[in-house]
Image (cartoon, rainbow, N blue to C red):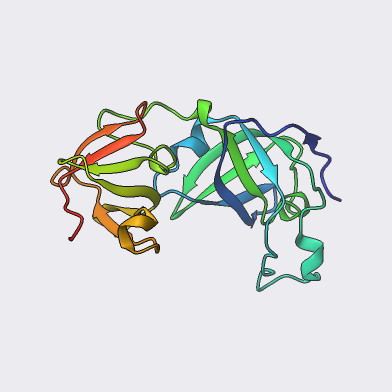
Amino acid sequence: MRPTLETAALPADAIEIGRIADAWGIKGWFKVLPHSASPEALFSSKQWFLLPPDRPMKPPRAAAVAPQAAQPAWTEPVLLQLKEVKDHSDTVVACAQGIDDRNAAESLRGARIFVPRSSFPAAAEGEYYWVDLIGLQVFNRESVLLGQVRDLMSTGPQTVLVIESPPEQAGGKPVERMIPFVAAFVDHVDLPGKRITVDWQPDY
């Protein structure tokens, strides 16, 4: 039996922070795939807003049902009240009200998890959430616009800003730059001003 979940409007500041991967155990717990290597927002919010997957999920290897049966049955945002979220080995697992057995947990498989940006815990001094950096304009010390932060990527020991330059700087075609997000190159991050200043030249 599928659980009956409460529909709810998605908050205006909702951020997608992960997906539900599959059921975990037989008591309604489920595995979560965070989008970030530091998923503090998953742990800080007692409520998750769920949307169905934006693409079909592959069925579990041991699934004994048709893949279609494992997809969420809702189309509107639903609210999930969390009971517990914890690290387990190399993954995150959670349980929620109304999700009491494995079948109920499997019905959430593939759901996209959103939480309000306002519920994120405060970042430590000198640390920033990736979502807050995307869209910022990047200038060098000479106030030359290098582009806008389009994405971030983790290379293991460090994070890299993926910058897309203005098309007019490259004959009408945007150019992608990658700048390590480390103190050696990043002078200042001004979140209110939506600006990052770096020690970087346009021809690097």
Of 42 and 95, which appears nearest the observer? 42
For the point 79% across and 38% down, which residue is it? 5
**Quadrant of the image occupied by residue 15:** top right
For the point 31% across and 35% down, which residue is it? 195
All told, the count of numbered labels is 0
Of 132 and 101, which appears nearest the observer? 132
For the point 64% across and 30% down, which residue is it? 11
Q: Where is residue 58 shown, x and y percent of the image?
A: 67, 69
For the point 39% across and 62% down, which residue is it? 172
Q: Where is residue 7 shown, x and y percent of the image?
A: 79, 35
Q: Where is residue 51 shown, x and y percent of the image?
A: 70, 46
**Is 140 rendered above or below residue 89?**
above
**Quadrant of the image occupied by residue 95:** top right
Q: Where is residue 99 shown, x and y percent of the image?
A: 74, 42
Q: Is residue 103 left or right of residue 151?
A: right
**Is 164 rendered above or below residue 190?**
below
